[in-house]
Image: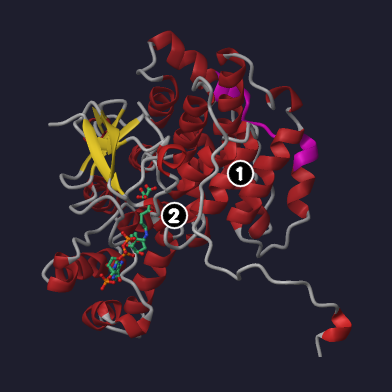
Amino acid sequence: MSDQATLILDGVNHELPIITGVEGERAIDIRDLRERTGHITLDPGYGNTGSCLSDITFIDGENGILRYRGIPIEQFATSPNFVEVAWLLIFGQLPTAAQYTSFADDLTRFANLDEGMKHHFEGFPRAAPPMAILSAMINALSCFHPDLHELDDEDQFRMAAARLISKIRTIAAYAYRHSVGKPYNYPDPRLRYVPNFLHMMFSQPFDQYVCDETVRDALNLVLILHADHEQNCSTSTVRMVGSSRANLFASCAAGVCALWGPLHGGANVAVLDMLEQIHKGNITPDEYVSMAKSKDSKVRLMGFGHRVYKNFDPRAQMLRTVTERLLERLGKPDPLLDIARRLEEIALRDPYFVDRKLYPNVDFYSGIIMRAIGIPADMFTVLFAIGRLPGWIAHWWEQSQEQGGKIARPRQIYTGNLQTDYVPLADRG
Ligand code: SDX
């Protein structure tokens, strides 16, 4: 295969280098296109545009492959450990026993919030969207760690990463407890990452929540499967904000806002709304699928389709297995799972979905798992953010280490008014 592309513009040949990734992905390098030809490219939604070179995650959308630092996600299912995967994504290799123990101990040590931050929660309405609180409080967190705005070396970066990954749980749990008018639960230093989060969410005074092993493993795997996904909307947002040299906290707070959208991380809440609508009998699965196919309805089959996966999202397949195992272990059959299975069965036989290569994505089953654990629907996307945080941090750091990194600044094609003159108010009629 050639390592150059020829662009012919106004009879002039321009040779453009082709870059090939380790898995054979090929890109035409256009970084000096405008300088050489006076032209830019146009790609709304960036579906055909690479923004960077990255070593973190590999996706093969045609074959349903997802690997973190080269490790297929399926291999994390045996004894899922989110903290270990967070280290892998951020630092590039699986932690040694000493590194893992030290990192896990840091996450335990950093779990508390400054007492001053607790009062911020009281300022939010009880019904405040948890994603609004999460984004605001991640930014507020940076006010208590001014020493971590500028990260001069990897040790300082590791402290900032550990603080964020640890405290995002506490912020999420406090947002939930505030929304239901219950007292905050301080983190319990005897508990590891997921059990400590569920303790902060669900323990009551004099009645500590005890985390069932199956629940612990299920939630570890849910967080792992959400941990990174290369240049998705929220991760690209974190890179965009980080490219201005904004600090790690501000960049991740921006990622939370991007993730909130119903076309992105907000889809897991929309999936549950869809399943509950069908469960209440307002509409049958077949009727819902028909509505989702109609352009007039503005309705989509939430949890289906993906910009990159044009085959099964491997995460959806793993989450379906986790859902079935968890519901069986808890003895909590959920009619919504049957409805989800029915929707999947109908859609995967329907040419509308098959022709457009629309398959279940990561959001299709995740909500049923979180509902079985007792997590309220308005917290589903917050859980997605807890899972995705290590990926955001890994990409922010990878970009910050690039030599000569530039601020991200896309171009445009102007389609507005040609030059015109100002008209004083008195003359405007
Ligand atoms: C995530 O990027 C990532 O990696 C994201 C993510 C991650 O880990 O970060 O994987 C997480 O965001 C998963 C996606 C969650 N969103 C949803 O489940 C919302 C429902 N899905 C869609 O809105 C849609 O599939 C997207 C947004 C996910 C992908 O959109 P695309 O690839 O831009 O596809 P498109 O909007 O151009 O649609 C192509 C065609 C259109 O029909 P035609 O105009 O060709 O007739 O497919 C149709 C669309 O109408 N279509 C759907 C559909 N998704 C696409 N029709 C009905 N139901 C759907 N879900």
Instruction: Kindly identify which residue carries mark 1.
Output: 253
Please, what is the three-letter code of the amino acid marked with disc 2?
Gly
Residue under the image location 49 percent in, 36 percent down:
392
SS for dot 2: loop
Q: Which mark is residue 265?
A: 2
Q: Is mark 2 within 8 Å of ligand 1?
A: yes
Callout 2–callout 1 Cβ contact below 8 Å: no
**Residue 410, percent from left and from top:** 51, 47
> Which of the image's four quarters has the N terminus?
top left
- Whether the magenta-drawn stretch holds residue 271 is answered as no
Quarter of the rendered structure image containing ligand 1: bottom left
**Residue 397, percent from left and from top:** 51, 26
Q: Which residues are magenta?
A: 106-117
Give the quadrant of residue 105.
top right
Residue under the image location 38 percent in, 54 percent down:
43
Q: Looking at the image, can residue 40 be seen?
A: yes
Q: Earlier in the sequence, mark 2 or mark 1?
A: 1
Of residues 327 and 338, the one nearer the viewer is: 338
Marks 2 and 1, Cα distance to the nearest angstrom? Answer: 14 Å
